[in-house]
Amino acid sequence: MMSTDPDSGAAGPAVAVSGRSQLQAQALHAFRAASGLTHTSARDCLARNGFDLRRAVDDFKALRSEGKLTPNYFQAFYESTVPRLMQITGLTPKAAADCLGCNGFDVERSAADTRRLQARGELGPGGA
């Protein structure tokens, strides 16, 4: 089964969606409709706000009213936080992005979460 990337239209393998992912997908759909952002920017804004739709909308409105919302704002934020977490923890890019997404894109909280999981033996080198 194939799915289509919402931004580029490129086809790729379909991925099974968990209950949590399904809720995140619903929030993403609602947020894109409300904000007019691209799939990627909307996803990054939601992740930055812990997939809390109300916080993401408030964040979006505040940035827009302050004139700080550029087309690549959330992508730039994402690209600056992933390398920081990788440097601190030694995670791979995908593992760092996943960890940040689960922790509201808070680098310090993500690093602490990673250290805790590594100490308990639940996370190997690089996030494997």
Image (cartoon, rainbow, N blue to C red):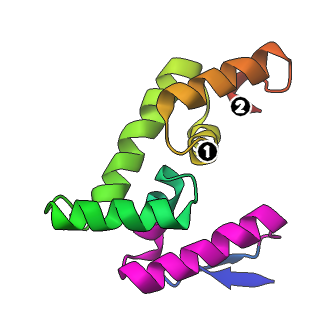
**Nearer the observer, 20 or 121:** 20
Toward the right, the furthest residue is 121
Please tell me in which quadrant of the rendered image residue 45 appears. bottom left
**Nearer the observer, 96 or 28:** 28
Q: Which residue is mark 2?
A: 127
Quarter of the picture holding the N terminus: bottom right
First in residue order: circle 1 vs circle 2: 1
What whole-number distance in Å separates the C-alpha atoms at marks 1 and 2?
A: 9 Å
Horizontal and vertical percent position of residue 82: 47, 38
Seen in the image, is 45 located left or right of residue 18?
Answer: left
| Callout 1 touching callout 2 (CB < 8 Å) | yes
Tell me the crowding category of disc 1: few under 14, some 14 to 19, or many 20 or more residues within 10 angstroms, Cα based.
few
Which residue: 65% across, 39% down? 95
In the figure, 11 relative to 87: above or below? below
Which residue: 28% across, 58% down? 73
Q: Which residue is mark 1?
A: 94
The amino acid sitting under disc 1 is: Lys
Q: Is residue 16 magenta?
A: yes
- Do we see residue 114 in this rendering? yes
Residue stretch in magenta: 15-42
